[in-house]
Image (cartoon, grey):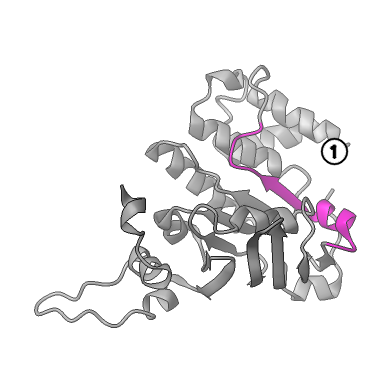
Amino acid sequence: MSIPATTSQVHGPAIQVQGLEKSFKQVTVLRGVDLAVPRGSIVALLGSNGAGKTTVVRILATLLRADTGTARVNGFDVATQAAEVRESISLTGQFAAVDEILTGRENLVLVARLRHLRQPGAIADELLRRFSLTEAGGRRVATYSGGMRRRLDIAMSLIGNPPVIFLDEPTTGLDPQARIEVWQAVKELARGGTTVLLTTQYLDEAEQLADRIAILHEGRIIVDGTLDELKKLLPAAEVEYVEKQPTLEDVFLSLVGAPKEQEQR
Protein backbone atom coordinates (compact mmCIF):
# COMPACT_ATOMS: atom_id res chain seq x y z
CA MET A 1 0.00 0.00 0.00
CA SER A 2 1.38 3.40 -0.91
CA ILE A 3 1.58 6.11 1.73
CA PRO A 4 -1.26 8.65 1.54
CA ALA A 5 -0.40 12.17 0.44
CA THR A 6 -1.63 15.30 2.13
CA THR A 7 -3.13 18.19 0.17
CA SER A 8 0.15 20.12 0.30
CA GLN A 9 2.02 17.08 -0.95
CA VAL A 10 -0.29 16.61 -3.92
CA HIS A 11 0.13 20.21 -5.07
CA GLY A 12 3.86 20.54 -4.39
CA PRO A 13 6.75 19.04 -6.37
CA ALA A 14 7.33 15.33 -5.94
CA ILE A 15 10.98 16.11 -5.18
CA GLN A 16 12.32 19.42 -3.87
CA VAL A 17 16.06 19.88 -3.25
CA GLN A 18 17.70 23.09 -2.02
CA GLY A 19 21.37 23.79 -1.31
CA LEU A 20 22.39 20.14 -1.04
CA GLU A 21 26.06 19.65 -0.14
CA LYS A 22 28.01 16.47 0.55
CA SER A 23 31.69 15.69 1.07
CA PHE A 24 33.56 12.46 1.69
CA LYS A 25 36.62 13.32 3.79
CA GLN A 26 38.56 15.80 1.65
CA VAL A 27 36.53 15.24 -1.51
CA THR A 28 33.56 17.55 -2.10
CA VAL A 29 30.96 15.80 -4.24
CA LEU A 30 27.93 18.11 -4.05
CA ARG A 31 28.38 21.87 -3.87
CA GLY A 32 24.85 23.21 -3.47
CA VAL A 33 22.38 21.24 -5.60
CA ASP A 34 18.95 22.77 -6.29
CA LEU A 35 16.34 20.66 -8.08
CA ALA A 36 12.54 20.42 -8.36
CA VAL A 37 10.79 17.45 -9.95
CA PRO A 38 7.09 17.95 -10.88
CA ARG A 39 4.67 15.15 -10.07
CA GLY A 40 4.06 12.60 -12.80
CA SER A 41 7.11 13.67 -14.81
CA ILE A 42 10.38 12.09 -15.89
CA VAL A 43 13.39 14.21 -15.00
CA ALA A 44 16.84 13.13 -16.12
CA LEU A 45 19.83 14.00 -13.97
CA LEU A 46 22.55 14.00 -16.59
CA GLY A 47 26.25 14.06 -15.86
CA SER A 48 29.60 12.41 -16.37
CA ASN A 49 30.96 9.66 -14.12
CA GLY A 50 31.81 11.18 -10.74
CA ALA A 51 29.50 14.17 -11.18
CA GLY A 52 27.53 13.24 -8.03
CA LYS A 53 24.37 11.75 -9.57
CA THR A 54 24.29 8.62 -7.42
CA THR A 55 25.11 10.65 -4.30
CA VAL A 56 22.03 12.81 -4.92
CA VAL A 57 19.84 9.73 -5.31
CA ARG A 58 21.25 8.08 -2.18
CA ILE A 59 20.49 11.19 -0.14
CA LEU A 60 16.95 11.36 -1.52
CA ALA A 61 16.47 7.67 -0.74
CA THR A 62 17.66 8.28 2.88
CA LEU A 63 20.72 6.07 2.40
CA LEU A 64 23.07 9.02 2.96
CA ARG A 65 22.75 12.15 5.05
CA ALA A 66 23.57 15.49 3.44
CA ASP A 67 26.09 17.78 5.10
CA THR A 68 24.06 20.89 4.31
CA GLY A 69 20.79 21.71 2.57
CA THR A 70 17.28 20.29 2.55
CA ALA A 71 15.45 17.70 0.48
CA ARG A 72 11.80 16.64 0.46
CA VAL A 73 10.31 13.64 -1.32
CA ASN A 74 6.53 13.35 -1.64
CA GLY A 75 6.32 16.22 0.82
CA PHE A 76 8.45 14.51 3.49
CA ASP A 77 11.82 15.73 4.75
CA VAL A 78 14.53 13.13 4.07
CA ALA A 79 16.37 13.98 7.28
CA THR A 80 13.51 14.14 9.79
CA GLN A 81 10.84 11.94 8.13
CA ALA A 82 12.96 9.15 6.70
CA ALA A 83 10.39 6.42 7.34
CA GLU A 84 7.68 8.32 5.43
CA VAL A 85 10.10 8.95 2.56
CA ARG A 86 10.91 5.25 2.33
CA GLU A 87 7.21 4.44 2.19
CA SER A 88 6.90 6.83 -0.76
CA ILE A 89 9.74 5.63 -2.96
CA SER A 90 11.34 2.77 -4.78
CA LEU A 91 14.98 2.68 -5.83
CA THR A 92 16.34 0.70 -8.75
CA GLY A 93 20.13 0.63 -8.86
CA GLN A 94 22.55 0.16 -11.71
CA PHE A 95 22.22 -3.63 -11.76
CA ALA A 96 19.05 -5.72 -11.73
CA ALA A 97 18.26 -7.06 -8.24
CA VAL A 98 16.38 -10.19 -9.25
CA ASP A 99 16.66 -13.80 -8.13
CA GLU A 100 17.80 -15.86 -11.10
CA ILE A 101 16.72 -19.16 -9.56
CA LEU A 102 13.08 -18.07 -9.33
CA THR A 103 10.74 -17.43 -12.24
CA GLY A 104 9.76 -13.90 -13.13
CA ARG A 105 6.35 -14.38 -11.56
CA GLU A 106 7.84 -15.88 -8.39
CA ASN A 107 10.12 -12.85 -8.00
CA LEU A 108 7.11 -10.54 -8.13
CA VAL A 109 5.00 -12.69 -5.79
CA LEU A 110 7.87 -12.82 -3.29
CA VAL A 111 8.18 -9.03 -3.12
CA ALA A 112 4.41 -8.60 -2.82
CA ARG A 113 4.33 -11.04 0.10
CA LEU A 114 7.27 -9.31 1.79
CA ARG A 115 5.25 -6.10 1.61
CA HIS A 116 2.25 -7.90 3.14
CA LEU A 117 -0.01 -7.12 0.19
CA ARG A 118 -3.21 -8.98 -0.55
CA GLN A 119 -3.51 -11.13 -3.67
CA PRO A 120 0.21 -11.25 -4.53
CA GLY A 121 -0.49 -13.52 -7.49
CA ALA A 122 -2.88 -11.02 -9.06
CA ILE A 123 -0.37 -8.22 -8.51
CA ALA A 124 2.34 -10.29 -10.19
CA ASP A 125 0.15 -11.15 -13.17
CA GLU A 126 -0.81 -7.50 -13.72
CA LEU A 127 2.81 -6.34 -13.65
CA LEU A 128 3.87 -9.10 -16.02
CA ARG A 129 1.17 -7.93 -18.43
CA ARG A 130 2.08 -4.28 -18.01
CA PHE A 131 5.74 -4.91 -18.84
CA SER A 132 5.11 -7.44 -21.64
CA LEU A 133 6.54 -10.35 -19.65
CA THR A 134 3.46 -12.57 -19.39
CA GLU A 135 4.80 -15.29 -21.70
CA ALA A 136 8.14 -15.30 -19.87
CA GLY A 137 6.59 -15.18 -16.40
CA GLY A 138 6.85 -18.94 -15.85
CA ARG A 139 10.51 -19.15 -16.89
CA ARG A 140 13.49 -18.90 -14.57
CA VAL A 141 15.04 -15.44 -14.65
CA ALA A 142 18.42 -17.03 -15.51
CA THR A 143 17.03 -17.53 -19.02
CA TYR A 144 16.02 -13.86 -19.46
CA SER A 145 17.83 -11.38 -21.66
CA GLY A 146 19.38 -8.26 -20.09
CA GLY A 147 16.44 -6.12 -21.14
CA MET A 148 13.90 -8.59 -19.74
CA ARG A 149 15.71 -8.71 -16.39
CA ARG A 150 15.78 -4.93 -16.22
CA ARG A 151 12.06 -4.68 -17.03
CA LEU A 152 11.33 -7.26 -14.33
CA ASP A 153 13.48 -5.27 -11.89
CA ILE A 154 11.50 -2.11 -12.63
CA ALA A 155 8.23 -4.05 -12.33
CA MET A 156 9.31 -5.26 -8.89
CA SER A 157 9.98 -1.67 -7.86
CA LEU A 158 6.34 -0.79 -8.62
CA ILE A 159 4.89 -3.25 -6.12
CA GLY A 160 3.07 -1.19 -3.52
CA ASN A 161 2.47 1.67 -5.97
CA PRO A 162 5.19 4.07 -4.78
CA PRO A 163 4.51 7.59 -6.10
CA VAL A 164 8.22 8.26 -6.71
CA ILE A 165 10.81 6.00 -8.34
CA PHE A 166 14.55 6.56 -8.59
CA LEU A 167 16.27 4.86 -11.53
CA ASP A 168 20.04 5.06 -11.15
CA GLU A 169 21.58 4.52 -14.61
CA PRO A 170 19.05 1.78 -15.49
CA THR A 171 20.55 0.86 -18.88
CA THR A 172 24.20 0.47 -17.84
CA GLY A 173 25.74 -2.46 -19.70
CA LEU A 174 22.68 -3.21 -21.86
CA ASP A 175 22.76 -3.72 -25.61
CA PRO A 176 20.80 -1.33 -27.89
CA GLN A 177 17.69 -3.53 -28.09
CA ALA A 178 17.60 -4.02 -24.34
CA ARG A 179 17.97 -0.27 -23.79
CA ILE A 180 14.94 0.38 -25.99
CA GLU A 181 12.93 -2.15 -23.97
CA VAL A 182 13.85 -0.36 -20.74
CA TRP A 183 13.01 3.04 -22.26
CA GLN A 184 9.55 1.75 -23.10
CA ALA A 185 9.12 0.51 -19.52
CA VAL A 186 10.14 3.90 -18.10
CA LYS A 187 7.70 5.71 -20.39
CA GLU A 188 5.02 3.34 -19.13
CA LEU A 189 5.76 4.45 -15.57
CA ALA A 190 5.12 8.10 -16.40
CA ARG A 191 1.93 7.26 -18.28
CA GLY A 192 0.71 5.63 -15.08
CA GLY A 193 1.34 8.81 -13.09
CA THR A 194 4.56 7.77 -11.38
CA THR A 195 7.24 10.42 -10.86
CA VAL A 196 10.63 9.25 -12.16
CA LEU A 197 14.04 10.71 -11.35
CA LEU A 198 16.43 9.09 -13.78
CA THR A 199 20.20 9.40 -13.54
CA THR A 200 22.16 8.76 -16.71
CA GLN A 201 25.38 9.53 -18.49
CA TYR A 202 23.83 8.74 -21.88
CA LEU A 203 22.78 11.83 -23.80
CA ASP A 204 20.40 9.94 -26.09
CA GLU A 205 18.67 8.38 -23.08
CA ALA A 206 17.91 11.78 -21.58
CA GLU A 207 16.74 12.98 -24.98
CA GLN A 208 14.40 10.02 -25.43
CA LEU A 209 12.85 9.89 -21.97
CA ALA A 210 12.94 13.13 -20.04
CA ASP A 211 10.33 15.85 -19.75
CA ARG A 212 13.08 17.96 -18.19
CA ILE A 213 16.86 17.57 -18.08
CA ALA A 214 19.12 18.78 -15.28
CA ILE A 215 22.85 18.73 -16.00
CA LEU A 216 25.00 18.05 -12.93
CA HIS A 217 28.61 19.16 -13.29
CA GLU A 218 31.28 19.41 -10.60
CA GLY A 219 28.68 19.06 -7.86
CA ARG A 220 26.19 21.67 -9.09
CA ILE A 221 23.15 21.78 -11.37
CA ILE A 222 24.41 24.11 -14.08
CA VAL A 223 21.25 24.07 -16.20
CA ASP A 224 17.71 22.69 -15.84
CA GLY A 225 15.02 22.77 -18.51
CA THR A 226 13.24 21.01 -21.33
CA LEU A 227 15.22 19.75 -24.30
CA ASP A 228 13.98 22.67 -26.41
CA GLU A 229 14.97 25.14 -23.70
CA LEU A 230 18.45 23.65 -23.49
CA LYS A 231 18.91 23.80 -27.26
CA LYS A 232 18.10 27.50 -27.19
CA LEU A 233 21.17 28.07 -25.01
CA LEU A 234 23.31 27.67 -28.10
CA PRO A 235 23.42 30.30 -30.86
CA ALA A 236 21.43 29.52 -33.98
CA ALA A 237 23.42 27.67 -36.59
CA GLU A 238 24.46 29.76 -39.57
CA VAL A 239 24.36 27.63 -42.68
CA GLU A 240 23.83 28.42 -46.30
CA TYR A 241 21.29 25.76 -47.22
CA VAL A 242 20.04 23.69 -44.27
CA GLU A 243 19.88 24.79 -40.65
CA LYS A 244 21.35 22.15 -38.36
CA GLN A 245 19.51 21.95 -35.03
CA PRO A 246 21.76 21.55 -31.97
CA THR A 247 21.72 18.18 -30.28
CA LEU A 248 21.76 17.54 -26.54
CA GLU A 249 25.41 16.51 -27.00
CA ASP A 250 26.19 19.98 -28.38
CA VAL A 251 24.51 21.60 -25.37
CA PHE A 252 26.22 19.31 -22.85
CA LEU A 253 29.71 19.84 -24.25
CA SER A 254 29.23 23.60 -24.51
CA LEU A 255 28.30 23.73 -20.80
CA VAL A 256 30.80 21.31 -19.25
CA GLY A 257 33.56 21.55 -21.84
CA ALA A 258 35.07 18.94 -24.10
CA PRO A 259 37.15 16.17 -22.46
CA LYS A 260 40.81 16.98 -21.97
CA GLU A 261 43.16 15.47 -24.51
CA GLN A 262 44.64 13.02 -22.04
CA GLU A 263 41.15 11.79 -21.10
CA GLN A 264 40.31 11.07 -24.72
CA ARG A 265 43.14 8.57 -25.10
Q: Is residue 202 above or below residue 241?
A: above
Residue 263: x, y in percent?
36, 52
Q: Nearer the viewer, residue 220 or 92?
A: 220
Residue at image position (56%, 31%) is: 149
Q: Is residue 202 magenta?
A: no
Q: Is residue 120 above or below residue 239?
A: above
Kind of residue at badge 1: Arg
Q: Is residue 190 above or below residue 248?
A: above
**Label 1: which secondary element:** loop
Q: Which of the 4 image quadrants contains residue 170?
A: top right
Work out which residue is located at the far front of the displayed protein and give it: 26
Q: Residue 178, can we see it?
A: yes
* Neighbour tally class for label 1: few under 14, some 14-19, many 20 plus, Cα within 10 Å: few
Q: How many marks?
A: 1
Residue at image position (66%, 33%) is: 97
Give the extent of the magenta segment.
79-97
Q: Which of the 4 image quadrants contains residue 233?
A: bottom left
Residue at image position (19%, 76%) is: 243
Residue 228: x, y in percent?
41, 75
Residue at image position (77%, 70%) is: 68
In the image, taking residue 120 as reference, residue 189 lies left or right, namely left
The residue tagged 1 is 115
Q: Nearer the viewer, residue 176 or 68?
A: 68
Q: Residue 37, can we see it?
A: no
Residue 62: x, y in percent?
79, 54
Residue 51: x, y in percent?
55, 59
Q: Which of the 4 image quadrants contains residue 114?
A: top right
Q: Is residue 83 magenta?
A: yes
Q: Nearer the viewer, residue 22 or 92?
A: 22
In the image, taking residue 94 as reference, residue 125 lies left or right, namely right
